[in-house]
Amino acid sequence: MTGRDLLLDMLSYRRPAGSQTERQFIERFIAPTGAKPDGYGNYILRVGEWPILWSAHTDTVHEQGGRQRVQVCGQTAMVPDGSNCLGADDGTGCWILLEMIRAGVEGLYVFHRAEETGCNGSRYIATHTPELLDGIQAAIAFDRRGYNSIVTHQVGFRTASDGFALSLSEALGISSLQPDDGGIFTDTLEYAHLIPECTNVSVGYTGAHGRWESQDLAFAEELRDAVIRMDLTDLAILRSPFDPLGPRGGGWWDEDPEVSELGTDLGPDPEEWWWDGEDGLHYGEPELYRCDYCDDVSGDTYELSGGRVCGRCVEELV
């Protein structure tokens, strides 16, 4: 089973994080690709050598597991009754990854677990197995509502450059997909300090997390076809993962960054960056201060009315 029939079959699974139905979904659709689970249960597959991470997440916000009836009206899929959501967030993303794997699109594929309960699967990778991401230049998640977004900012922090987003839009050839600085907290944000360009791409669902969630099947197919045929060498890698993830427009470039080819290692040595609690990330030797409460010396300090406080103590005081 492939194509639209496969997508509709996948959407019939209600998949709360950790549920039996999510496990059945993984065993039926994802495990047969050869993807293997890591220590948290994320399923991972490497196809070829291209330094791109493609991702989606296997869980949904369904209130209970089991199967559901999916109704198609023209080009739109929805659930007629009995479920609190369709689960195109992110069943459609998982379907796109499967279609890409079948077509032999190169990259590192990650089917994340527990995104809807706090991005726990991606956080596990970023924290416990960051070496998995060595050399990866872009993380692209098919996990975004609507038709228009190539996300450049998540919860106000820059995770992808506008230049990358525009180059991805051009490579896909879908003019509606444009840079979007209004992204929410998703799996790719967990990788923003490790991977230069981290984004989410619209897959054509609307009303996510709600009773009236629906999926535009024609747009999902258009996006799948575009990803399979696009030239990955056209992607511009501009952002340094070690830049401060400053509020909108962030990045501390003294001048316009050099446009690199995909695969070029960008950014200064991460060991040279340090964090200041008040001002964010800095490069070079840190200024060290003594905490007036615990007497520790640190660059991560805050100036409060009661004196200078380290990051650990400020959580107890504020």
Image (cartoon, rainbow, N blue to C red):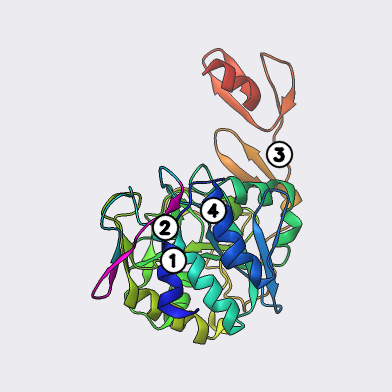
Mark 2, mark 3: which one is toward the viewer?
2
Q: Which residue is mark 3?
A: 286
Characterize the local packing of mark 4: few (<14), some (14-19) or many (20 or more) Cα atoms within 10 angstroms.
many
Task: Measure how far apart labels 1 and 4 are at the Cα level.
Answer: 14 Å
Mark 4, mark 3: which one is toward the viewer?
4
Task: Measure how far apart labels 4 and 3 are at the Cα level.
Answer: 46 Å
Q: Residue 280 placed where, x, y %?
A: 57, 41
Task: Measure how far apart labels 2 and 3 are at the Cα level.
Answer: 42 Å
Q: Amino acid at mark 3?
A: Pro
Q: Which residue is mark 2?
A: 89
* Picture residue at 65% right of the left edge, 72% below the top: 33
Q: Which residue is mark 1?
A: 92
Q: Residue 92 placed where, x, y %?
A: 44, 66
Q: Earlier in the sequence, mark 4 or mark 3?
A: 4
Task: Measure how far apart labels 3 and 1 are at the Cα level.
Answer: 45 Å
Q: Amino acid at mark 4?
A: Glu
Span shown in magenta:
65-76
Observer able to see residue 253: no
Q: Verify CB contact (< 8 Å) between mark 2 and mark 1.
A: yes
